[in-house]
Image (cartoon, helix red, strand yellow):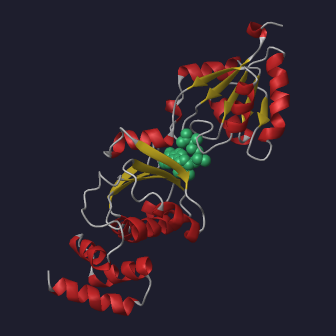
Amino acid sequence: MSDTDLGTLYVVATPIGNLEDMSPRAARLLGEVALVAAEDTRHTSRLLRHLGLSVPMLSLHEHNEAARVEQLDERLQRGESIALVSDAGTPLISDPGFVLVRELRARGRHIVPVPGPCALVAALCAAGLPTDRFLFQGFLPARTGARRQRLEGLVTHQETLVFYESPHRIRDTLVDIGAVFGERRLVLARELTKSFETFLDGSAPALLVRMEADPDQARGEFVVMVAGAEARESSDSASLEADAVIEALLAEGVGVKQAAAVAARLLGGAKKVWYGRAQALKETR
Ligand code: SAM
């Protein structure tokens, strides 16, 4: 069998919320392949139904990806083409597929990208932060200690920093970003391409206050973008300075009591102590 008789692996991006973002090419290919390898077949079957397609599917997720390589390669060698999709967006970007693509490329198989939605690109292109250089960090570690350590390692980077985050951890992550980056500007992109798409702009402490005032702002899926070290608008040092944080909160119109609560959460210590400090700073304004 010559190389041209082999099948192709198409790496197909799918919508991150708005089904109109499905490209005609991606839809056509999903209808033409012999098999769709999907992160979650139930999830992808909804997309296929929406497109009016009925295509055999096979699950490919982080727990079985390595074991699927031989099976999928055999099908390519039989001349069958395969589409790789994840639940949303571009496969391999904080999603399964890397092991498969690495192994198949090492074997010289034909792999074709079918580009489309990707949350980090969608977020960056509308955030108003520098995009000439950015550092995508995927998901931060789940535990606070490891998360702060990772953030501390990024504090001097000049590129715009980009993270993915879930609604369960968004507040904790903002607390840690505030503790490490202080007043550094960040942009929070929420529910991209969906009905409640929102971009919030401000320091981590200020955004936490916004979330306390409007808990809906903590719902949904997030891309967190932090200004790079040179691009930040504040000249404060990267380390957190308690007075600067409280002053910024007061300047945002946040009351003394709430500013003290945020300071206590960010920096530890008793709310009562921070209340006194916030009161004093307010009086000297
Ligand atoms: N492969 C996907 C991509 O191309 O963007 C990312 C998959 S990753 C498992 C899921 C994370 O991407 C979410 O937790 C969130 O951080 C981000 N994300 C996905 N869809 C999003 C959306 N509509 N709005 C904001 N963030 C989104």
Identify the residue at image location x=69%, y=24%.
53
Residue 259 placement (x, y as % from top left): 32, 79
Q: Is residue 73 left or right of residue 210?
A: right
On screen, 187 above or below 71?
A: below
Which image quarter: residue 112? top right
Residue 118 seen in the figure: yes
Residue 52 in view, yes or no: no
**Image location (x, y in percent) of residue 93:** 58, 41
Q: Quadrant of the N terminus?
A: top right
Nearer to the camera, 43 or 88: 88
Q: Is residue 48 left or right of residue 149?
A: right
Q: Is residue 101 left or right of residue 225?
A: right
Which quarter of the image is occupied by the C terminus? bottom left
Q: Is residue 96 above or below residue 146?
A: above
Position of 220 relative to 268 (above/below): above
Identified at 46% across, 64% down, the residue is: 152
Q: Position of residue 136 (x, y in %)?
A: 49, 46
Q: Quadrant of the rendered structure where residue 168 is?
A: bottom right
The x, y position of residue 176, in whole percent, is: 46, 68
* Front-lying residue, 156 or 258: 156
The residue sitting at 84% across, 30% down in the picture is 70
Q: Is residue 70 above or below residue 206?
A: above
Q: How many labels were placed on the picture?
A: 0
- Residue pictured at 35% horizontal, 72% vertical: 240
Left/right of residue 258 with respect to residue 31 in the rendered view: left
